[in-house]
Image: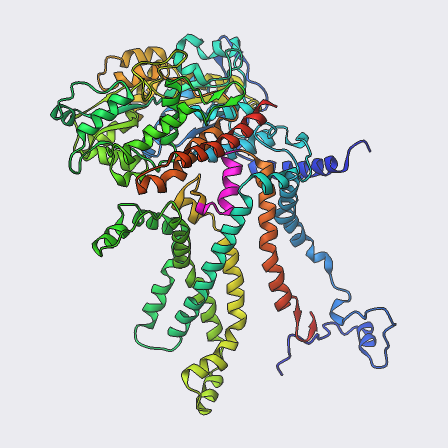
């Protein structure tokens, strides 16, 4: 009764369709045979969506790329259509005489470290709240607190706590340790990583939890019957189920970390200390404090490419567009 | 076809984005289609709506709404036109707004601008230059405090900014603490200031409250001490950030925490409100770089009745008088200007509005509600008898405008950035001369690049 979604079912029973599906038909060599579901599709129905995508995504994207190729600043803003076309000069300036390369390094390392720490945390938290026990609902809710708090609030709270005479340093002093400076200097990088981890791990937890929920009851039963102990069961039975959701979480979390503007901005302000001059802050300062819109657009395009790389690898790896049964 | 490919692409993209922006801005733009005629001094704006964008006064949100309402009614009575108010929270917000407005050619008719942001706004070329005709519509140039006009434009013939309010900087001092230390009157040179501050530092009480981590305060000290010694930072086509004068200013400013130990070590993490809080709690004798805006906070604190304002020292560090060519600046020229958008289709109405809110009574009332000093000369004179306010008015009259250059934003950023990057050193107790020189050299290069672009 259950028909697989991956198997195309002819929705129309017109003679043409039947003839095409009939036996004995040969595909001309060199010409790909169109699947049933590809014929007579009302593609025009895509127009509203396509139009919306053009307006919302493609036009701004094209504008951004165009801006990165012109000399657009406060002086040319008003007559920006006639701003001088300077080709890749903005890119060269960004690479040679701005902090772009350093910012890219800071952003990428910060994102990777944050993700590398949050993934095991999130998965562990998901496993801990998988089986029912008293108070599980409460634990689950508590786990979500960092996630539901707006980034702005998280950053404000941490900024207050990490002041030179804030609660963190007072506590450390009482324990006989010297806290030092958290919001400036070399420590600020680790402050950023720490607060990001604090705020971001529930995201991994949520996706891992959804992966765990997808494990059939029978699988648990079968592994219990086979006498698998908890670690073996986790390692060989449960984790394979988590591979999909967690790698998606890994990718999305890394991209989120790279893109996070609010957290470093509220924590450190602008201009940011050089140790936390991450890409979004650099682009912001270049745009709205130096008013070099062209230059900052070039930086933004570079950051877009940077983000597109892992995304591309991921899409290739999971082949989201192709299902097991063939083309959809 | 005559048009190069990139140019054509640009035109298409521009057309597309204009359409989008027009759609997005629809409804918020000006409603008047034609220029309203000024007949007999009265502007008839019946059926029109003037769009005004002002700085949000975070301290007094309700009062601001009430003031908007009151001014709206007054304007309606005078011209028959309505006002649609909008607010912005920061210069960046505003720049975004200006950006979209100048590109699409519609948006607010009147903008309120911070004084130091006026050069940047000027460089966009999007605002009306004030000729005799415009000044007459406003009630004449004489109506305004002369010093307040110092940052209206690059020169007399090219002014865009109409002074609205003045927020000159002064220092607050704790009269009891100074008296207890045997200090008769506040310091007038920075050296004397440091010496007094040393005397005033005992136990957990410090001589000075300074906000090193503030995003706006630090550059004002450096600029002030520099110009008092003859370095205006932007000197013609040259930036002079790596000048020994400016280095000395940084050393003095940093020295309060590293060498003289007259400020709370925690202040390396403070923004202005935290420094104000320390002064308000009686933990600091001096609180420089404040304005009459701090009156409500101080009057509600432990130092109520025990504080006064005074001019900040005007003689640079290491000197006993101002060297020749130097300006004894008491403050940056600080406050708000009003500008009228060039694209506005109801400029007469816009000027009628600006005239209304720069008239004496409105200005005095604005001071009463918000604590911001009038730019209207008559109103300022009337307040000069107020003992608390007098130093601030004097500071306003003796304030010096920051250089009128489109590159000023970058220079200001550079001045601030030297402090931001020095904070770890400040915290550890010493900013080495070589570190400071290196930072100044880096920022000098950045600022000079910005200035070179401004000159093109």
Asked whether residue A278 is drawn in magenta, I would say yes
The correct choice, above or below, for B185 with respect to A84 in the image is: above
User: Where does residue A40 sit, x and y in percent of width and height?
Assistant: 77, 65
Q: In this picture, which residue range is highlighted in magenta?
A: A275-290
Which residue corresponds to the image point at 53% horizontal and 37% vertical from the top-left? A287
Which residue corresponds to the image point at 49% horizontal and 55% vertical from the top-left? A109
User: Where does residue B209 sit, x and y in percent of width and height?
Assistant: 26, 32
Asked whether residue A135 is drawn in magenta, I would say no
Q: How is the image coloured?
A: rainbow
Which residue corresponds to the image point at 44% horizontal and 91% vertical from the top-left? A227
The correct choice, above or below, for B133 with respect to A176 in the image is: above
**In the image: residue B248, left or right of residue A81:** left
Front position in the image: B80 or B176: B176
* Residue B69 shows in this picture: no
| Snapshot quadrant of residue B67 | top left
Front position in the image: B126 or A242: A242
In the orientation shown, which residue stands out farthest toward the right?
Answer: A28
Front position in the image: A326 or B171: B171
Main SS, magenta region, reads helix
User: Where does residue B199 sit, x and y in percent of width and height?
Assistant: 17, 28
Q: Name the image quarter holding the C terminus of chain A.
A: bottom right
Which residue corresponds to the image point at 47% horizontal and 29% vertical from the top-left? B411
The correct choice, above or below, for B187 with respect to A30 in the image is: above
**In the image: residue A43, left or right of residue A273:** right
* Residue B139 shows in this picture: yes
Q: Name the image quarter holding the N terminus of chain A.
A: bottom right
């Amino acid at each position: 009764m259950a028909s697989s979604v991956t198997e195309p079912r002819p929705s129309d029973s017109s003679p043409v369709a039947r003839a095409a599906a009939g036996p004995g038909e040969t595909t001309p060599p060199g010409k790909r045979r169109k699947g049933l579901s590809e014929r007579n599709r009302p593609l025009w129905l895509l127009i509203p969506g396509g139009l919306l995508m053009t307006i919302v995504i493609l036009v701004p994207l094209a504008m951004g790329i165009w801006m990165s190729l012109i000399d657009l600043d406060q002086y040319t803003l008003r007559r920006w259509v006639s701003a001088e076309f300077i080709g890749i000069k903005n890119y060269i300036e960004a690479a040679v005489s701005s902090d772009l390369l350093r910012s890219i390094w800071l952003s990428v390392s910060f994102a990777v470290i944050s993700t590398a720490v949050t993934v095991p945390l999130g998965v562990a938290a998901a496993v801990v709240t998988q089986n029912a026990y008293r108070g599980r609902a409460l634990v689950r809710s508590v786990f979500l607190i960092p996630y539901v708090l707006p980034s702005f609030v998280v950053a404000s709270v941490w900024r207050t706590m990490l002041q030179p005479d804030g609660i963190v340093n007072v506590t450390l002093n009482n324990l006989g340790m010297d806290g030092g400076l958290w919001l400036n200097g070399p420590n600020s990088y680790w402050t950023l990583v720490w607060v990001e981890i604090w705020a971001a791990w529930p995201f991994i937890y949520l996706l891992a939890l959804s992966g765990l929920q997808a494990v059939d009851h029978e699988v648990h039963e079968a592994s219990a019957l086979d006498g698998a102990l908890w670690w073996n069961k986790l390692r060989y039975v449960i984790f394979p189920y988590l591979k999909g959701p967690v790698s998606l979480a890994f990718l999305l979390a890394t991209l989120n970390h790279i893109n996070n503007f609010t957290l470093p901005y509220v924590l450190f302000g602008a201009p940011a200390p050089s140790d936390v001059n991450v890409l979004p802050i650099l682009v912001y300062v270049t745009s709205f404090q130096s008013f070099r819109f062209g230059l900052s657009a070039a930086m933004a395009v570079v950051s877009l490419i940077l983000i597109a790389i892992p995304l591309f690898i991921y899409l290739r790896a999971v082949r989201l567009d192709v299902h097991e049964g063939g083309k959809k | 076809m005559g048009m190069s490919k990139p140019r054509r692409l640009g035109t298409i993209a521009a057309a597309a984005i204009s359409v989008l922006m027009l759609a997005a801005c629809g409804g918020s733009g000006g409603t008047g289609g034609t220029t309203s005629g000024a007949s007999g001094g009265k502007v008839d704006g019946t059926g029109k709506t003037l769009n005004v964008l002002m700085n949000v006064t975070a301290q007094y949100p309700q009062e601001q709404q009430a003031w908007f309402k009151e001014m709206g009614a007054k304007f309606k009575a005078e011209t028959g036109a309505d006002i649609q108010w909008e607010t912005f929270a920061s210069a960046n917000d505003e720049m975004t707004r200006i950006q979209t407005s100048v590109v699409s050619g519609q948006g607010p008719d009147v903008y309120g601008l911070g004084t130091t942001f006026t050069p940047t706004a000027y460089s966009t070329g999007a605002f009306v230059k004030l000729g005799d005709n415009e000044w007459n519509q406003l009630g004449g140039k004489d109506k305004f405090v002369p010093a307040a006009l110092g940052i209206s434009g690059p020169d007399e013939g090219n002014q865009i900014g109409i002074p609205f309010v003045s927020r000159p900087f002064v220092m607050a001092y704790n009269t009891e603490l100074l008296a207890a230390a045997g200090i008769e009157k506040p310091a007038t040179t920075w050296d004397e200031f440091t010496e007094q501050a040393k005397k005033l530092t005992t136990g957990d009480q410090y001589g000075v409250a300074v906000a090193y981590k503030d995003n706006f305060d630090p550059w004002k000290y450096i600029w002030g001490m520099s110009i008092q010694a003859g370095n205006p930072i932007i000197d013609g086509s040259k930036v002079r950030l790596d000048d020994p004068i400016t280095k000395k200013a940084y050393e003095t400013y940093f020295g309060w925490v590293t060498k003289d130990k007259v400020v709370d070590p925690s202040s390396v993490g403070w923004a202005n409100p935290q420094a104000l809080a320390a002064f308000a709690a009686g933990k600091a004798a001096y609180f420089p770089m404040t304005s009459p805006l701090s009156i409500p906070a101080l009057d509600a604190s432990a130092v109520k009745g025990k504080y006064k304002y005074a001019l900040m020292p005007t003689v640079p560090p290491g000197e006993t008088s101002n060297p020749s060519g130097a300006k004894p600046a008491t403050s940056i020229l600080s406050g708000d200007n009003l500008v009228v958008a060039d694209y506005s289709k109801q400029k007469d109405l816009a000027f009628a509005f600006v005239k209304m809110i720069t008239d004496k009574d409105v200005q005095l009332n604005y001071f009463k509600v918000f604590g911001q000093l009038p730019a209207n000369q008559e109103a300022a004179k009337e307040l000069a008898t107020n003992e608390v306010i007098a130093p601030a008015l004097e500071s306003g009259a003796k304030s010096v405008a920051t250089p009128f250059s489109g590159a000023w934003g970058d220079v200001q950023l550079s001045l601030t950035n030297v402090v931001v990057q020095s904070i770890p050193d400040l915290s550890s107790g010493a900013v080495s001369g070589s570190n400071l020189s290196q930072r100044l050299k880096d920022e000098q290069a950045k600022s000079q690049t910005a200035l070179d672009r401004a000159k093109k």
